[in-house]
Image (tube, grey):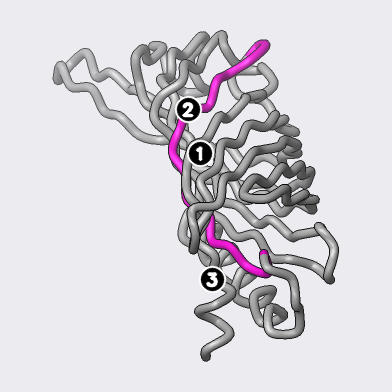
Amino acid sequence: MNLRLLTAGILLCTAVSTQVKAQSRPDKLYSMSGIGLAFPVGETADYFKPKFSTSLGLNLGLGNGGLFLYPKVSLHAFAYNQITPDAGYTYTLQKGRSTTYLLNVALGYRKIVNKWAFYGFAGAGGGIILTPQAGVNAATLQVTQSNKSNGLGIAEAGGGIEYNIGGANLFVETSYMYGFGKIQNRTFNTVPITLGIKPNLSKLLSKL
């Protein structure tokens, strides 16, 4: 499932990037990679705590204005404290680790002012969130751990600031992510904050 999600993201990014030569704007295509934290909010804070997270994506300019397409894969990590045992399990797992594999495709708008750029975006997607489970065998004194795959759709909206350093932009981005599904019978909501770099791939692709 994880491989299928990442493969779908790569195929989407490859397909949309073929349009870059037909555009004349200076921000035709950026790759995006960032690190940061995803902060659980609302009910999600009952079972998740923030840990190190990463994001990978593309910004593909649409037309000659400020519109761009923004496919992104979010690989957020959380500390996981189970509230109630999953079906078939007796014990709750504490201080575990949960990971997301979420693909979001958004439409955004960027405004460039000298070396600075300001942008906003909104979109939707989906994927899986892995949560650990622990089974205890009292007879053999063994603990068996496995992962539960929680599939859900998501909606995400946010914005960011970029600073141009030549062939790339440094950026800070924040968003609100809402999950159309529940974990531990509670809605999934988080606020990712990401720092990273967006290399401008337009010059490279124009030479191919």
The tag on residue 76 is none
Cα separation between marks 2 and 1: 12 Å
> 155 or 191, which lies in front?
191
**Looking at the rendering, which quadrant does residue 142 occupy?**
top left
- Specify whether residue 91 is in view: yes
> Which x, y percent locates residue 136?
28, 18
> Which x, y percent locates residue 203?
55, 77
Magenta stretch mostly in which secondary structure? strand
- Specify whether residue 148 is in view: no
The residue to which callout 1 is attached is 100
Cα separation between marks 2 and 3: 26 Å
**Looking at numbered disc 2 in the image, what kind of residue is underneath it?**
Leu
Q: Is residue 114 magenta?
A: no
The tag on residue 201 is 3
* Range covered by the magenta-colored residues: 27-43
Q: At 65% across and 59% down in the image, what residue appears?
A: 59
Q: Is residue 120 shown left or right of residue 82?
A: right
> Which x, y percent locates residue 3?
46, 60
Q: Residues within 10 Å of mark 2 (few under 14, many from 20)?
A: many
* Up-down relation of residue 41 to residue 122 (above or below): above
Q: Earlier in the sequence, mark 2 or mark 3?
A: 2
The residue to which callout 2 is attached is 37
Q: Given the current orientation, which residue lies at the most extreme front position?
A: 114
**Looking at the rendering, which quadrant does residue 146 occupy?**
top left
Q: Looking at the image, how many numbered discs can be counted on the residues?
A: 3
**Which callout, 2 or 3, points to the residue nearer the camera?**
3
Q: Is residue 15 shown left or right of residue 101?
A: right
Secondary element at image label 3 = loop
**Looking at numbered disc 3 in the image, what kind of residue is underneath it?**
Leu
